[in-house]
Amino acid sequence: MDPTLDSELRNDFLVEAGELVQRLGEQLIGLEASPRDADLLNAVFRAFHTVKGGAGFLAIEPMVQLCHHAEDLLNVARSGQLVIDAERMDALLEALDLLNDMLVALAGGGAMAMPPPDLLRRLSPNGAVAAPPAPPKPSAPPPADGTIDDSEFEALLDSLYGAGGVPGAPAASPTTPEGISDDEFEALLDNLHGKSGAPGSSDAAPPAPAASGAINDDEFEALLDNLHGKGGVPGAHAAPAPTPAAPAPAAATRHAAPPVENTVRVDTARLDTLVRRAGELVLVRNRLLSLAAKQGDETLELAASELDRVADGLQNAVLGMRMQPVGRLFQRFPRIVRDLSRQLGKEVELVQEGEDTDLDRSLVEALADPMVHLIRNALDHGVEMPEERERAGKPRKGRVTLGASQRGERIVITVSDDGRGMNPDVLRRKAVEKGVIDEAQAARLTENECYELIFRPGFSTAAVVSDISGRGVGMDVVKTRVAELGGMLQVRSKLGRGSTLELAVPLTLAIQRVLMVRVGTRLLALPLGNVEEVFELAAGQRQQLDGRVVAAHRGRALVLADLAGWVGIEGPSGRHVVVLHIGHMRLGCLVHDVLGREDVMVKPLGPLFEGVPAVAGATVTGDGRLALVMDLAGLAGGDGQLLPSLRVSA
């Protein structure tokens, strides 16, 4: 096989198999809850069968054997002869993990070992390892006498119907040529000739099978081509017969036209290039709008307005291409909940809501690790043991709910549990015991501020350190990652009723909406999604508290940071305060002027400026000036404390 073609086929297989494997995790967990669900059984069976077919074409024997044994178990379950219990589900999930590892090895060009015999035995319906399928071999030309053995004929039926003989039905006993029905034989001929009758003819209906079941040499050779593929490899399908240019009405009445392909796979690098070009167009749009406003030329203003409308439409269309349903993020969590609840000895039901909510594809991967920490925290600290729940008058099985929704230009993801909730007094005491805060600070904390203690580095309420919790690093990682994405965290809890952690992130990271501010002669861009409000500092409103300068605002102490000192400008601080949400923190930034809102594309500053704290990149404003785009996670410091250069002296 041509190496280029082989690489393309492998990449296509990796994409298709990867999507099937991703869905399989959620489907298997659903099957464990409803083991007699015929639709789920068929869906899981088809997924393993499809992966096996592609692996067989590429001669990946370890993957073929693994999928074949999983098929055997599922096939018997489809026939109703056994029910997938917890032990068999463990084997299927272990096979899924191994299959995923094989795909990773195939993508990286690494070695791939055969499946462990113990796993194959556990996948066998009767506990014994079945004979593995024969490895793909190049087929010989059809025998001169036109004979076909039973295995080849059965493979032909599998190619048409699937391993079960009938779509969606349990596998039947091996079919021999003498035992084929007229309908099956006619369907085989339809598969040979295409959906529009005899090859090369648009008005001829498929011929009825002869009473004797005879088949001519040309038809027999084409059937073998369909089995072995043009390259002589079993499982490879021959190219379909060419569709007539103008099919006659007679043929159309018998067979419906095949569905038109309405999707196309696009490399993500090309998509990102298109997004960058759209972002540059937005910058040009901003520039022209600024020039038109200054010139006062009506014709120029009309042209700039038209460009504004077109650029907005293009921007929305391009950003829509980057969107993926948040269900792609959620589908990995049923497996995590199942395994962790069994490890903890708890009974937990996972409920998902809003899976169709669209999210930027870059955020789908970026949120995976923070969401894992939130799920683990809900199961370990939130949901009680079954006996404890019964004593509290609750059902033995706890509930964890994953929800997603869109609020304006933000995606809000919630992780809720119906467990024990959080006790503010316990959180205060634990924070003091671990040295996170002192007793005076703990006494001033409000109830909501007590909940936010769980995001402090080193804080944990676990009595014993385990491999799940107790080290005080998980929720700190969540806070840091969410802040890096320009997101916000909020905690709500009710003692004895459960807790909810709400995570809000921007709809997209490709084109940012920012608030332009002036500090001295410098322009700074603050992500608008993190801006809570803007107000002017009144005389006497500034005070000292715990070594920091704060402002009494809305009944709370708001920590102030002077951006003038950070950018190196001497002189009086600004009197305008921009209130920012950074992770779970609120911070007031002093600036000299607030200029307004803009849509910008962030450009990297290059290797010389890598590692500069609080700078995410730069952008060009509408009047052609350069503005620094702030990295708010860096602005608050890696440990959640303000950078020393941002502290305001009294």
Image (cartoon, helix red, strand yellow):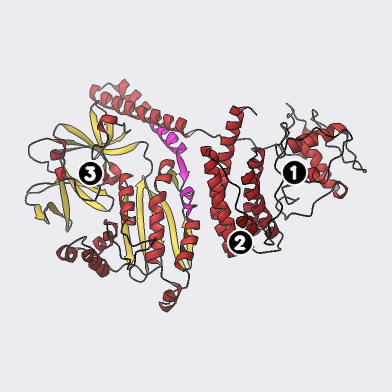
Camera-nearest residue between 35 and 200 = 35
The residue positioned farthest toward the right in the image shown: 212
Residue at 70%, 52% in the rendered image: 168
**Label 1 Cα neighbours within 10 Å, binned few <14 / some 14-19 / many ≥20:** some
The reply, left or right, for residue 214 in relation to residue 600 is right
Count of numbered circles on the image: 3
Q: Which residue is mark 2?
A: 88
Q: Residue at x 70, y 50 (%)?
A: 132
Whichever of labels 3 and 1 marks the residue nearer the N terminus, that label is 1
Inspect the image, locate mark 2, and give the three-letter code of the amino acid beneath it: Arg
Tell me the magenta residue range: 311-334
Label 1 belongs to which residue? 160
> Neighbour class for label 3 at 10 Å: few (<14), some, many (≥20)?
many
Structural distance between the alpha carbons of marks 2 and 3: 51 Å
Is residue 157 something one can see in this rendering?
yes
Q: Is residue 27 visible?
A: no
